[in-house]
Amino acid sequence: GDNARLLPGVYSPFALSGLRGVHIITGGFSGDGAVIHGGVKPRGEDKACGIRVSGCPDLVIEALIVEGSPGRGIRVTDSPRVTIRSCIFRENAIEGIIWGACDDFALVACHCVRNGTGDNDRAHGAYGSYGSQRPHVLRCFFKNNTGSGLQLNSTIEDGKHPISGAFVEECSFEGNGVSGTPALSLVSVQNSVFSKLYFKDNNAVATLFSTVDSVPCRRISFNDYTDLGTHKWEIRKVNAEEIITEPGVGWRPGEAPRPDPPSPPIPTLDLASRV
C-alpha cells in the first residue's frame, strides 16, 4: 500500500475506491493538521460525504478532522480491515461516520461531536451497519450528537446476518440523543462485549436493544460502566436474550478528552493535487 501525509490546510471532499493498504495521516488533534470540509454527492448516491470509501481493504485513516458535510462525514463500504484512528468527526448534517459491509472495522481514539446538524434530528455520531462483523470501537468520545453516540445496526432484513463479535471499550457518551434516542443503540447484535463505558447527561436512556423479530440481540455482556446522567442506567429490550449487566466498580476516563480544535483559516485545497 501507499502512504499519503497531508499537509496542514482545509481540503475539498474526496473519494477512494479500489485501493488496498493505503495509509492517510496528518496532524489531527493538534489543530494544525488537515481538515476535510464540506461534502459532495458521489455518483449514484443521494447523500453527500466528506470522504467516501468503497472497496479499499486494509485502509488506515489517521488524525483527520472531517466537518461540515451536508450529509455524512465519512462513509465506508465493502472494505474489510479498515482502521480509523485519532480523527474528529464534527458538525456533519447526518452521521459523523458510517460503515457497512466492513468486517473487522476499527474506530480508535476518535471524537464524534455535534453531528446531526441537518434536517435529520436523530443522526448518530458513529454508525456501524449492514452485517459488519467484529467491529472494534476503542477509547472514543461521543458528545452532543442528535442521535445515538454509537449505533450498531445490522440493517439486513433477511434475518441471517446479525452483527457479531463487537467489542466496545473505554468509550464516553455525553449529551447524546433527542426524543428518546439512546446514547448507545444496538439492533440485531450478538455475541458482543461492551466494557468500561461512561455515560453523562445523555438525553435518553443509556442503552437500547431493539431488533426485527427474526434477529434478536443475544449473548451481550456489559461490564464496568458508570452513568452520571439524569437517566438511571436502563436497558430497554425488544426481542433480546441472554443479556448480562455487571456494573462492577464503574469506569471513568483517565483524563479529559483531547481538544476539539478550530479549523485553520487556510484556503480549501484540492486533495488530488496534494496526494
Image (spheres, grey):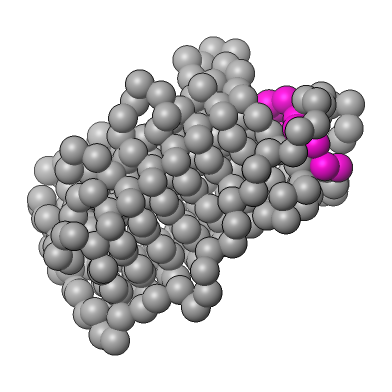
Residue 272 position within the rendered picture, expressed as x and y whole percent measured from the top left:
83, 26
The residue drawn where x is 34% and y is 26% is 120
Q: Is residue 194 above or below residue 48?
A: below
Q: Nearer the viewer, residue 148 or 135?
A: 148
Identify the residue at the far bottom of this view: 249
Magenta stretch holds residue 13: yes
Nearer to the camera, 265 or 71: 265
Q: Residue 249's quadrant in the figure?
A: bottom left
Depth order, front residue of 69/152: 69
Q: How many discs appear?
A: 0
Estimate the x, y position of residue 45 in percent, counting from the top left.
Answer: 51, 16
Majority secondary structure in the magenta region:
strand
Residue depicted at x 52% and y 74%: 255
Q: The C terminus appears in which quarter of the rendering? A: top right
**Residue 89, position as x, y percentages in the image:** 55, 43
- Residue 25: in sight, yes or no? no
Residue at 77% across, 47% down? 33
Residue 170 belongs to magenta span: no
Please indicate, yes or no, whether residue 241 appears anywhere in the rendered image.
Answer: yes
Determine which quarter of the picture holds residue 114: top left
Question: In the image, what residue occupies the spot 32% across and 48% down?
Answer: 176
Please state if 139 lies on the left or on the right of 116 as rendered. right
Residue 50: x, y in percent?
Answer: 61, 29
Range of residues picked out in magenta: 7-16
- Above or below for 194 versus 143: below
Classify residue 207 as left or right of residue 89.
left
